[in-house]
Amino acid sequence: MPAYNAAKTIEKTFNDIPKGLASKVLVVDDASADTTVKIAKKLGLKTFRHPANLGYGGNQKTCYWEALKYHPDIVIMIHPDYQYDATLTPELVKPIIDGRFDIMLGSRIRTRKEALAGGMPWWKYFSNRFLTILENVVLGLNLSEYHTGFRAYSRKVLKTIPFQRFSNDFVFDQQILVSAVSFGFKIGEIPVPVRYFPEASSANFFSSVRYGLGILWLLLLYIFYQLKILRPKIFKMNA
């Protein structure tokens, strides 16, 4: 769980994870100003704290680096802000267990009505749809959402892709997927409910704009990579 000021929601998120499913739950706190660390430790969770804020991508790097030390079969990332329904974790990981996919995403975009009724801001919904369509065209996939904070990765994915080279910012989430595509990993998804509320973390408008521009640049790099014009180090190098 990559945490930042999640004191009000981390316990509810943890309690929703089906008991006995995860062998270890790790929390990486990105220099929160609240009591996130205190609550995580009270819950008995293995907790790491950054002395300074590294950003969302930097937080995930520590999450995966520390998780891999336990030699897991699957690593699940869920935001501890209670925006995602952790009770659906068994459904998220089953396709990886069955060998059908290497990465699974929890998609919040089932219908426009449901997404907006769940509290997703209209501008975030439409930008999500635009970027998802563009990513599908460039990557040759047919996913309903790339921008979810509820994900599962096989160990092979995290051992293969160079995630330490990725951004420390929000675009990390997309770099990990585009890089995985370059390595030939299979990505699947399940639908999950939309759950927006005041305590749920969410990038503000300006951060979202920067995130969107970062994705456009990332997709352009991938096109250049496919055309063998550039060889960015975040993609498979022998293409």
Image (cartoon, rainbow, N blue to C red):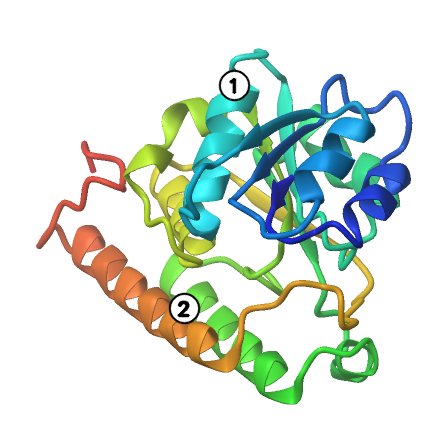
Residue 40, image quadrant: top right
Q: Residue furthest left?
A: 229
Residue 103 percent location from the top left of the image = 58, 39
Q: Is residue 112 visible in the rendered structure shown here?
A: yes
Instruction: Compute the Cα span from label 1 to label 2.
Output: 27 Å
Going 62% across and 80% down the picture, which residue do you hit? Answer: 125
Q: On the rendered structure, is 14 left or right of 26?
A: right
Label 1 packing within 10 angstroms: few (<14), some (14-19), many (20+): some
Q: On the rendered structure, is 183 left or right of 223?
A: right
| Numbered circle sitting on residue 206 | none
Residue flagged by tag 2: what amino acid is it?
A: Tyr
Q: On the rendered structure, is 145 left or right of 115?
A: left
Residue 166, image quadrant: top left
In the image shown, does 106 or 59 lie closer to the viewer? Answer: 59
In the rendered image of this protein, does residue 69 appear above or below residue 94? above
Going 44% across and 48% down the picture, which residue do you hit? Answer: 53
Residue corresponding to mark 1? 68
Q: Quadrant of the C terminus?
A: top left
Going 80% across and 39% down the picture, which residue do you hit? Answer: 89
Give the mark nearer the N terminus: 1 vs 2: 1
Element under disc 1:
helix
Residue 146 percent location from the top left of the image = 55, 60
Residue corresponding to mark 2? 211
Element under disc 2:
helix
Residue 165 percent location from the top left of the image = 28, 38
Residue flagged by tag 1: what amino acid is it?
A: Leu
In the rendered image of this protein, does residue 200 appear above or below residue 14? below
In the image shown, does 133 or 55 lie closer to the viewer? Answer: 55
Residue 59 percent location from the top left of the image = 48, 42
Q: Quadrant of the N terminus?
A: top right
In the image shown, does 135 or 140 lie closer to the viewer? Answer: 135
Residue 209, image quadrant: bottom left
